[in-house]
Image: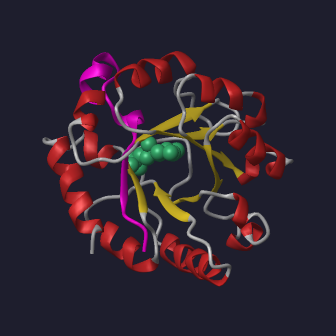
Amino acid sequence: MASKIIAPSMLAADFGNLQRDTEMVNNSEADWFHIDVMDGHFVPNISYGMPVIQAIKKHATKPLDVHLMIEKPERYIEEFANVGADIITVHYESTVHLHRTLRQIKDAGCKAGIVLNITTPISVLEDILPECYMILLMSINPGFGGQKFENVTYQRVKKLRSMINEQELDTRIEIDGGVTDKNIEKLVEAGADTFVAGSHVFKSPNPTEAIKRLKALSNV
Ligand code: DX5
Ligand code: ZN
């Protein structure tokens, strides 16, 4: 299986100390920055946009994994690429012409991925999978950090891993929502290889150690 990736979610960082928290991630065993963009339409919450991403990019030494929770993301792909996104994922539920949007992400020089809400069947990915660098499976209802992990995720990861294997692809499976040191091993066992962690990292007394532990537990 592909090497494991830990992506701390900057949604849980201290925005008053963004440079400090960005440098903490730089100096940790984390692999990517996970950046959650919410528009108050696709999800009930509003997070942050281009200026904040630019501020993180200015100090970040690792790739930015930008998760767009916005309606019609095709309107903003180039702008997100311009402020420093390396990977852009869009929700299956947020855009009608998904194939076109994925091409747009790649044309902008980024890696492209699709996100599925918990109730969207894995089967919708069958024909579009070869176009994706990564699939992000939500393990909570998107919109807020700090929610409880939904156990249905394990069977969804297994289904997706079989589909990826059947098509002989090496697509990454990223899990987002409620990831902790209690469930990461079981997620790896099910077939996931990329992990977002917000509260678990930033609410920990020692975020660098929390990242180190997630990384160690995922490398089984
Ligand atoms: C929620 C976001 C997540 C969030 C995860 O919609 O997509 O990335 O930051 O936070 P935790 O790890 O606290 O569940
Ligand atoms: Zn996210």
x, y percent for residue 118: 61, 62
Could you tell me which quadrant the N terminus lies in?
bottom left
Q: What percent of the width, then of the height, locates residue 187? A: 40, 71
Residue 43 falls left or right of residue 84 = right
Residue displayed at 51% across by 37% down: 36
Q: Quadrant of residue 165?
A: bottom right
Question: Horizontal and vertical percent for residue 158?
Answer: 53, 80
Residue 185, compared with residue 162, is above or below; it is above
Q: Position of residue 102 (x, y in %)?
A: 74, 47
Depicted 90 relative to depicted 1: above or below: above
Q: Give the residue drawn at x 37%, y 37%.
A: 62
Left or right: 133 as drawn, with respect to 201? right
What segment is highlighted magenta in the picture?
1-21
Whether residue 127 is visible, yes or no, is yes
Q: Name the quadrant of the C terminus.
A: bottom left
Q: Nearer the viewer, residue 68 or 28?
A: 28
Q: Nearer the viewer, residue 18 or 113?
A: 113
Q: Is residue 146 visible?
A: no
Instruction: Say how the picture is coloured.
Output: secondary structure
Q: Residue at x 64, y 37 (%)?
A: 109
